[in-house]
Amino acid sequence: MASYYPHKQTVLITIACVIAVGGVFVYAKQGSSPKKSDSKPSVSTDIKVVSSEKISSTTDWRLSFIDKQTPSTPKPISTTQESKDLTLTDQFGRDFFARYIQLKQSNLIENESFVADTLNQSIYSAAQSAEQPKAYTLADVSILANATTAQIKAYGNSIGLIFSTHGVDGDPAVVANEAFEKGDMSLLKQIDPIISSYETITTMLKNLSVPQPLAAYHVDLLNAVSSMAKTSRDIRNVESDPMQTMVSVSAYTTVQNSLTVSLKSMKSYFSIVGISYVSTEPGSIFSQLL
């Protein structure tokens, strides 16, 4: 089974914030100062486990990375462009820029409190409109009513076989953290097989017949794996849409815990009904859950 790192979403959130917010300030500065648009703007301002304390005290590598990038040409606000055609980061930038202009027109741009509130409002608005993973329900799975003990045991072996065969090797947040530390975004391609594994497991769980007593746990597991697939995709696309990455990664630990809890719940049920697996059976994977 995959190894999970419970606090690394803090790292990706930090990375996404630096890129998204830094880009927006460049965007706002250029948009509000057209005469200086020809000059190059200056922007100033975790998977291995990296603590939040370490993140807050060691930001040089992030600032160095940002400084090395060529800022994107700001996109003009278009009244005809559909929001659905914009990334979440685009929407965030457009919203913040509009609020920024209002502050400037009201001579409040030097008021740090107002600027902070404005930024928070834009972040909240973006989070509310962020794409969410598909939510599966009992109606999305095939349920076996009156399943026999043999069928329940076979189901456990099927779950074990799926995870042992298509288990995720690696953590997308670890890969992204390494990519940012080294300033080498080509490393993000290492997330592709992780995405593929989660997507394969999601498909196989959807197609599996589930004994009635385990149906709720199965749906929880399906949603957790599906969410991990989406989170991995969003981390992979952190360069093009860091705000979406930030939103997805904010739920990283919750989703991981949900995945583990659903499997542990299955393990408890097997124990209650007297089902056990020998080491040669795929279902023995449940014995690895502590």
Image (tube, helix red, strand yellow):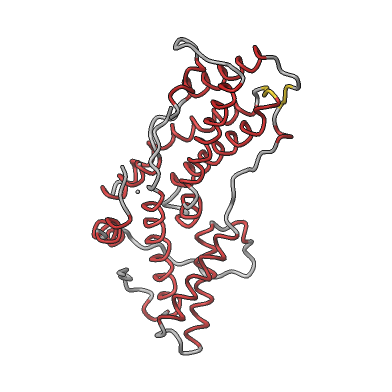
Quadrant of the rendering where the N terminus is positioned: top left
Residue drawn at 43 percent across, 50 percent down: 238
Residue drawn at 49 percent across, 67 percent down: 93
* Residue 211 in which image quadrant: top right
Query: x, y (%) of residue 225?
Result: 54, 35
Question: 76 above or below 279?
Answer: below
Q: Is residue 139 left or right of residue 239?
A: right
Q: Nearer the viewer, residue 264 or 136?
A: 264
* Residue 21 in which image quadrant: bottom left
Residue drawn at 38 percent across, 66 percent down: 22
Number of residue marks: 0
Question: 243 above or below 283?
Answer: below
Query: x, y (%) of residue 233?
Result: 49, 42
Q: Nearer the viewer, residue 81 or 129?
A: 129
Q: Is residue 193 left or right of residue 160?
A: left
Query: x, y (%) of residue 247?
Result: 50, 54
Quadrant of the rendering where the C terminus is positioned: top left
Q: Residue furthest bottom?
A: 107
* Residue 61 in which image quadrant: bottom left
Query: x, y (%) of residue 110?
Result: 39, 85
Q: Nearer the viewer, residue 106 or 133?
A: 133
Q: Is residue 238 left or right of residue 78?
A: left
Question: 189 above or below 162?
Answer: below
